[in-house]
Amino acid sequence: MKAVVITTPGGPEVLKLQEVEDPEVKDDDVLIKVEATALNRADTLQRQGKYPPPKGESEYPGLECSGTILSLGKNVSRWKVGDQVCALISGGGYAEKVAVPAGQVLPIPPGVSLKDAASFPEVACTVWSTVFMTSKLSSGETFLIHGGSSGIGTFAIQIAKYFGVKVFVTAGSEEKLKACKDLGADVGINYKTEDFVARIKEETGGKGVDVILDNVGGPYFEKNLESLGIGGRLFIIGFMGGVKAEANLSLLLAKRLTVQAAGLRSRSIEKKAEIVSDVEKNVWPAIAQGKVKPVVYKYFPLSEAGEAHKLMETSTHIGKVLLLA
């Protein structure tokens, strides 16, 4: 099969489509003929040599895919050859075929094309496992999403609105804020021209928000604590701004705040299967009803993975960038 190989750690130009061995299919796996895979920030870090795959996983990038099942491991009972599916994977999506533990496979949601379904597994599992399963965001609460126009952000806006949450977003341009508003965001804040802490205080009558989903990290840490209300929860899923922070920790105590962080890729197969099952039960109905839609900015062929990475690193995109196998 062909796969996108990181020939050496570096810029987008190190990604090359090459002929490689087919993946090994274990007893609990399904082999998927890939229709599409989607870019995630983690892929760009892996390309630079900063985020190696977990031990024993595919060395090729790609954390989600959609496609058709080609074969099954002997323990697999739910799926059959020919099923159209999408999946959360630990790597290997940038390829014509990928082997995936059966518990990380999802049916294509009704009304979504096979290729566009590749835009959902990573964002849905990330947002559901952090904000809903862990931070317990619930109807009637307020929620701030940093990077509202990202793949994670565009999904988080829609699923939060589906569950009756008031949504605040930050983004870096009026075009991005308009896209967030069109998806249902209640309040848009341009972080380049506004102080998001002041705007949150103003919009909430000084109370602050209940939950924040943050991918910036260090530079936003104290500002996030200031933006939370009593009993607020901060969930950190990335460090695009850096990993070091200085903060007034008394805010944690005074407001009874909770700060958590987690990644998805390094979790156990059992934990991923639990998250995927929860996503199918809670998120898939929202997609089937048309309340959560795929937001795809651009499609590239697998052979142009480098160009796709260049686009992602400009941060001009809104939603997801897909590679078609």
Image (cartoon, grey):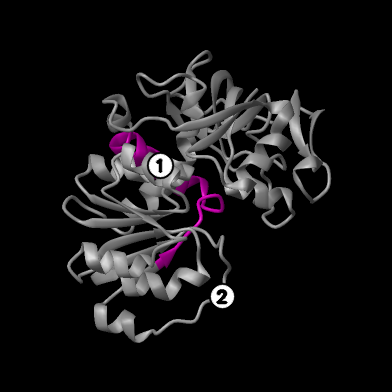
Q: What residue is drawn where x is 67% and y is 33%? A: 94
Q: Any magenta on residue 273?
A: yes
When the figure is inspected, residue 216 is found, relative to residue 291, above or below; the finding is below
Is 231 on the left or on the right of 92, as rendered? left
**What distance separates the C-alpha of mark 2 from that of mark 1?**
27 Å
Q: Any magenta on residue 269?
A: yes
Report helix, strand or loop for mark 1. helix
Give the magenta part as a residue range: 260-283
Report helix, strand or loop for mark 2. loop
The disc labelled 1 sits on which kind of residue? Answer: Thr
Out of 53 and 302, give the one closest to the viewer.
Answer: 302
Residue 312 showing in the rendered view:
yes
Q: What residue is drawn where x is 33% and y is 33%? A: 292
Disc 2: which residue:
244
In which quadrant of the rendered image does the N terminus lie? top right
Q: Which numbered disc covers residue 154? A: 1
